Image (tube, rainbow, N blue to C red):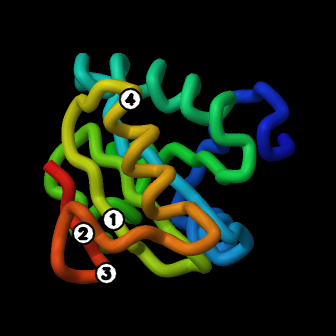
Amino acid sequence: MGIGSGSAPKDLDDHSFEGFIKGARYAAVLFWSGSCMPCRMVSLIFNELQSLRPGISFGKVNVGASGVGARLGVMSVPTILLFRDGRRVARVVGVKPIQVLLEIFDNYFSASPKEDIYADSGQSDLM
């Protein structure tokens, strides 16, 4: 599954997560649950984002089948974590319009990120 290939985001688990984020310059990971209706909405948006931003690696973690979310402090779903060079740079919680997500992605995943417009630290929590 190549970046921007039109395929679905990569399913990640306890074994594949670290390698996925460390192997990508830019990575976006959706934490979701099968019983979560908002997660289904965000999943559709997330798939569209993948087609619009081919330079970003997209992955998904089912929190019911993996402990990754708990280790990273994911307290609710849907949550999208953004990673740059293996380091978490932002957290987006809940359902957001695609235009808002595009702005966030473009801010954190540009060649030279703009000033952080969402928070004061490098690990922004966007709610």
Which residue is labeled 4 in the image?
Answer: 99
Q: Give the label, 1 or 4, closer to the camera.
A: 4
Residue in front for this viewpoint, 85 or 60: 85
Asked which secondary structure carries label 4, the reply is: helix
Q: Are marks 4 and 2 in contact (CB under 8 Å)?
A: no
Q: Nearer the viewer, mark 4 or mark 2?
A: 4
| Residue 83 location (% of width, % of height) | 50, 68
Where 114 falls versus 97 (above or below)? below
Residue at the spot 24% in from the left edge and 63% down from the top edge: 117
Task: Please name the amino acid that badge 4 sits on.
Answer: Gln
- Which three-letter amino acid code belongs to the residue tagged 3? Gly
Quick one: label 1, few (<14), some, or many (20+) residues within 10 Å? many
CB of mark 1 within 8 Å of CB of mark 2? yes
State how far apart marks 4 and 2 are (Cα). 18 Å
| Residue 45 or residue 59, whichever sits in front | 45
Task: Residue at 16% x, 47% y: name it.
Answer: 76
Residue 70 location in percent, x, y?
26, 65
Give amino acid for label 2: Ser
| Residue located beneath label 2 in the image | 124
Q: CA distance from mark 2 to mark 3?
A: 6 Å
Please tell me whether mark 3 sits on a helix, a strand or a loop.
loop
Q: Are marks 2 and 3 in contact (CB under 8 Å)?
A: yes
Which label's residue is closer to the chain start, 1 or 4? Answer: 1
Question: If the image is split into quadrants, where does the N terminus sit?
Answer: top right
Q: Position of residue 24 (x, y in %)?
A: 70, 68
- Among numbered discs 1 and 2, the one appearing first in the sequence: 1
Q: CA distance from mark 1 to mark 4?
A: 17 Å
Q: Which mark is residue 90?
A: 1
Q: Which residue is mark 3?
A: 122
Q: Nearer the viewer, residue 65 or 42?
A: 42
Q: CA distance from mark 1 to mark 3?
A: 7 Å
